[in-house]
Amino acid sequence: MKLPTKLLILIILDFLLSWFWIKQMDPDPSISIGILIIVPLVIGINLLLALLLYFTKKELSKLFLVNALISAIIVYFVFDSGIKRHQQIRYESWDFTIGDTVFKITHMKLDSTFSMSESTMPGSSTSFLDGDFRKKGNEYHLITDSTNYVIKNGLLSGFKKDSTFKLTKLDD
């Protein structure tokens, strides 16, 4: 088998192993710093294999030298997509603006609740409302003890008297 074919097989194997491992790990954003350990570890394993194979099969040694960089890139992107998948399974968010205030609605999918926050400065927000999130047909109802807001067709109603607000769906 030629070197490019072996490299392709190794890349496919790297991707599959990385994908299964990271899917099993289900990383959340709080462990994203772990990428600083995982990527060097993957590079180190490949370099160690290259060193061990240098004395027995020099052709395979070159393969693992090249794979050290390729596998690190694969692990980085698979880890990043694992964090995004984790967030998409658990949360969805929208925002809207009134004057100089940005309001954000976050739906916690696993327990069917929501949280609403406001921000007047980038990087700073205050959560001021929590409640139940219920789907009824093509509407979402945000219910608290004293309020019932409705999201329908990308519009929020019930937040301010006789007003609707266009929501922007966010990629969390």
Image (tube, grey):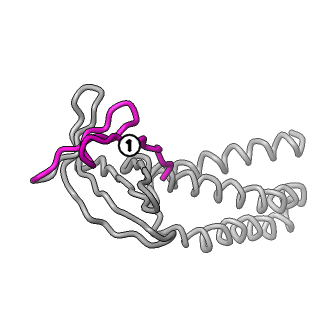
Instruction: Give coordinates of residue 122: x percent, y percent.
Output: 51, 69
The residue beneath circle 1 is 165
Q: Is 144 positioned to the left or the right of 121 in the image? A: left
Quadrant assignment, res 120: bottom left
> Looking at the image, which is closer to me, 130 or 18?
130
Q: Residue at x 66, y 46 (%)?
A: 13
Instruction: Give coordinates of residue 137: x percent, y percent.
Output: 25, 26
Pick out the residue farthest to the top.
Answer: 137
Q: Is 21 positioned to the left or the right of 40 in the image? A: left
SS category of the residue bearing label 1: strand
Query: Magenta residues, as a range?
Result: 146-172
Tell me if mark 1 has few (under 14), some (14-19) or many (20+) residues whose alpha carbon lies within 10 angstroms of its own: some
Quadrant assignment, res 127: bottom left
Q: Residue at x 88, y 59 (%)?
A: 62
Q: Is 127 positioned to the left or the right of 39 in the image? A: left
Magenta highlight on residue 114: no
Q: Residue at x 22, y 58 (%)?
A: 130
